[in-house]
Image (spheres, helix red, strand yellow):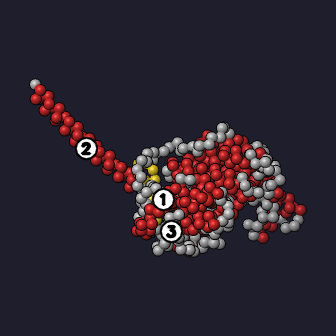
Amino acid sequence: MMKPDIHTLAHHLKQERLYVASEKQLIQRLNGDVLKTAERLYRAAWITKQQRINLDRLILTSAEASPAECCQHAKVLEDTQFLDGYKTLGFQESIYGEFLGRVRENPRLVASCLVAGERLNQEHTQGVIYTVFTSLYGNCIMQEDESYLLQVLRYLVEFELKESDNPRRLLRRGTCAFSILFKLFSEGLYSAKLFLTATLHEPIMQLLVEDEDHLETDPSKVTERFTPAQQERLFGEKGSEGYRQKVAAAVEANEAKLVTLVNKFIGYLKQNTYCFPHNLRWIVSQMYKTLSCVERLEVGEVRTMCTDLLLTCFICPAIVNPEQYGIISDAPINEVARFNLMQVGQLLQQLAMADGDGDPRRKNSLAKFDKSCVSAFLDVVIGGRAVETPPMSSMNLLEGLSRTVAYMTHSQLLCLVDFVRSVMAGDYLREEEHILLETLMANVPQSRTVKSNSLELTPSNTPQLSPTTTPANKKNRNLGTYLTAVPLLHHQIALDVLLSMLF
């Protein structure tokens, strides 16, 4: 009886071993597929964000970036190749990767360096800010990167806004490190897209359907779009009392329409506060908490700054350009609709301002609103207990994976290193931060002077940084080709042609 039993047991054990081996192979294949998919995701995210930055340069700063230049830049981005960092950096890849990895894991140091660079008027500061977001923190696709960036933003509130003589003016300019990083972060946040779509889709569609006229509220501009013959037919003889009365009536009618429209937008804002992104709520709450402790700032002024941040950097840009944010995709926006959307956005921004700060030309329009209409929205956003730890995204589909590579061009890498060296040579860092940077930079090679800013990509200077995503406990890192991929681990590191650096 024993022999058959032992024989059967041996057979089952053999089958089980084969099954386990088969499952292991399957898991290894699946892990390989995950890593390849994650690598494609990182590369696509890098190119997409660079394309978005390129588009913003064309739209917002057309004087500095001609259409031809931006089109050429877009073509270069489309043709981006990704190479391992070691093919560009050689044995120095691991040195750069070690440096990037340690800087990435120190949000306080990152914030201090950015603020110091701004105070020194370092010419590459804005380019470095973009590199910090797109390369060092990988467009915040991973939760770990998102957490690091939220902490960078919190420290920027403390080091930049809190120390500014006029933090509100600094925010409204939109060119400080905090404003730029907040905008980059909110633009790519999935929960932010859901909130903006839920809030703005319906009122924007109503505006597109209902109004065919420019809702101009400036009496001196109401008649500008009409020919002299049309002006005389619609308003009478120019300069006459009847002319003035008809212009005033047209302005009043436009103001009434605008008030109705803006109230619709505000209503949808309040109605959808339940889905306002938790991480943006955390940033605004931290900003309110930190600035409320500044003696020279009144609580009302701090509230105005928080509301201004949400409207100027988050909500109003989506109102004016809803196509870019995916809010509408099936309805064309003509020149009249665009003008009216801008009017709505400007009125919302005026409502966020303190009494006396608004545009006097909009005084009549603003008088028709409930003064608390926008502040009620802020109350919901900053309400509740402010916690120190940044919130995690509710949907984490990449749990168990960690990013081990950074994608950046060779010029971006050199710009970043030169930026850090210039900050070290200045006098705006705390002593402990200066000592830490000296330690981190001890082995980093001296780089040649970088003439172009870090946004420029050419076939010769675009190393590919290909971040690879690996299980969280794995410690390997790679770098890229035209885009250099630099590993972000503290040990091995490699660069791609778009230098991909491993942390």
Q: Residue at x 63, y 50 (%)?
A: 154
Q: Position of residue 210 (x, y in %)?
A: 66, 52
Q: Are marks 1 and 3 in contact (CB under 8 Å)?
A: no
Q: Which residue is mark 1?
A: 98
Q: Position of residue 309 (x, y in %)?
A: 68, 52
Of badges 2 and 3, the one in the foreground is 3
Q: Residue at x 11, y 29 (%)?
A: 4
Q: Is residue 134 left or right of residue 404?
A: right
Disc 1 element: helix
Q: What is the number of the mark on residue 445?
A: 3
Q: Quadrant of residue 180?
A: bottom right
Say which label, 1 or 3, has the lower sequence index. Answer: 1
* Label 3 Cα crowd, 10 Å radius (few <14 / some 14-19 / many 20+): few
Q: Quadrant of residue 181?
A: bottom right
Q: Which residue is mark 2?
A: 21
Q: Is residue 167 left or right of residue 97?
A: right
Q: Could one spot residue 454 in this view of the protein?
A: no
Q: Residue at x 60, y 73 (%)?
A: 66
* Label 1 Cα crowd, 10 Å radius (few <14 / some 14-19 / many 20+): many
Q: Nearer the viewer, residue 391 or 371?
A: 391
Look at label 2 and name its amino acid.
Ala
Q: Is residue 96 left or right of residue 14?
A: right
Q: Position of residue 318 (x, y in %)?
A: 62, 55
Say which label, 2 or 1, has the lower sequence index. Answer: 2
Q: Quadrant of residue 400?
A: top left
